[in-house]
Amino acid sequence: GDIVQNCFGYHLTPAGMIFENGARAVGAAVLPAGTGQTELQARAAHDVGVTTYAGTPDYLKVILDKAEEMGLALNITKAAVGGGALFPSLRQEYADRGIACLQCYATADLGNIAYESAAQDGMIVDEGVIVEIVRPGTGDPVPHGEVGEVVVTTLNPDYPLIRFATGDLSAVMEGTSPCGRTNMRIKGWMGRADQTTKIKGMFVRPEQVAALVARHDGIGRARVIASREGESDVMTVRIEATGGEADHYAGAVSEVLKLKGRIEIVPPG
């Protein structure tokens, strides 16, 4: 069977356990790798003979590049990714390296919501949830094909949720998947209905930016900019301040936003 290197986090997030339980349910062995320590990740993938990766879309490239740098041959031929956008160029790079990469759409509260099949034609809604696409702020369903907020109901007896608003945008696709699965399909993640953004698989919310501003009297306003460099997410924090060096704010940025990034100081206005 497959050996899955599970690079989703196990610490204060359910993603690691969600994927481990799924992998074990289909008879796969799991290497509970978690996040970080890329050199060790590459060495473990080589030594254990990992065949499948599970984690955020861009971290697999980091492991592959590190293994190549270390002269290690890896046997990874499959990847199940989530927690961030899978850009077509990155999927193509994995295909060029002999890796079939499919993505899923899940949240910490709901677990899996939808997933890709080998057809790669939209995302098929999981049979354990009820998905609606609604007009943000109203809860009113939109016509099929129109972009709206993803609202999900799960009747899980341990943790039922009724019309849980995810804050994510998507749209319903007409027809059924060419792979033969007949459940409803959505177009996948198409953005946010609010100002929250996701960088390296982690949410950054407006209230965190407000907390950063409140931390220093010298900060007038702050803005978080999410961008891409190569196939990796990059966070830039732009701070309006009358003085001070970027390093002065680095600790607060890491502590409040839970991520490291570039810091740019700009004059007020």
Image (tube, rainbow, N blue to C red):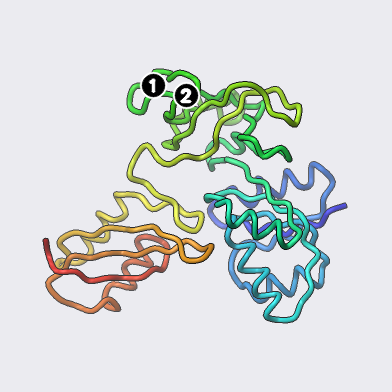
Q: Which one is in front in this view, the residue at disc 2 or the one at disc 1?
A: 1
Residue 1 horizontal side relative to residue 42, left or right: right
Residue situated furthest bottom in the rendering: 70
Q: Residues within 10 Å of mark 2 (few under 14, many from 20)?
A: some
Compared to residue 246, the image places residue 185 above or below, namely above
Relative image position of residue 120 (x, y in whole percent): 67, 39
Quarter location, residue 243: bottom left
Relative image position of residue 172 (x, y in whole percent): 53, 26
C-beta proximity under 8 Å, tags 2 and 1: yes
Q: Which element is circle 2 on? A: strand
Residue 77 horizontal side relative to residue 190, left or right: right
- Residue at 40% x, 40% y: name it: 192
Q: Quadrant of the C terminus?
A: bottom left
Q: Is residue 264 visible?
A: yes
Residue beneath disc 1: 139
Residue type, mark 2 in image: Arg
Relative image position of residue 85 (x, y in whole percent): 53, 50
Foreground of the two, 143 or 200: 143
Q: Which element is circle 1 on? A: loop
Residue type, mark 1 in image: Gly
Foreground of the two, 158 or 24: 24
- Residue at 49% x, 58% y: name it: 200
Q: Is residue 10 visible?
A: no
Q: Quick one: label 2 or label 1, which is nearer the N terminus?
A: 1
Residue beneath disc 2: 163
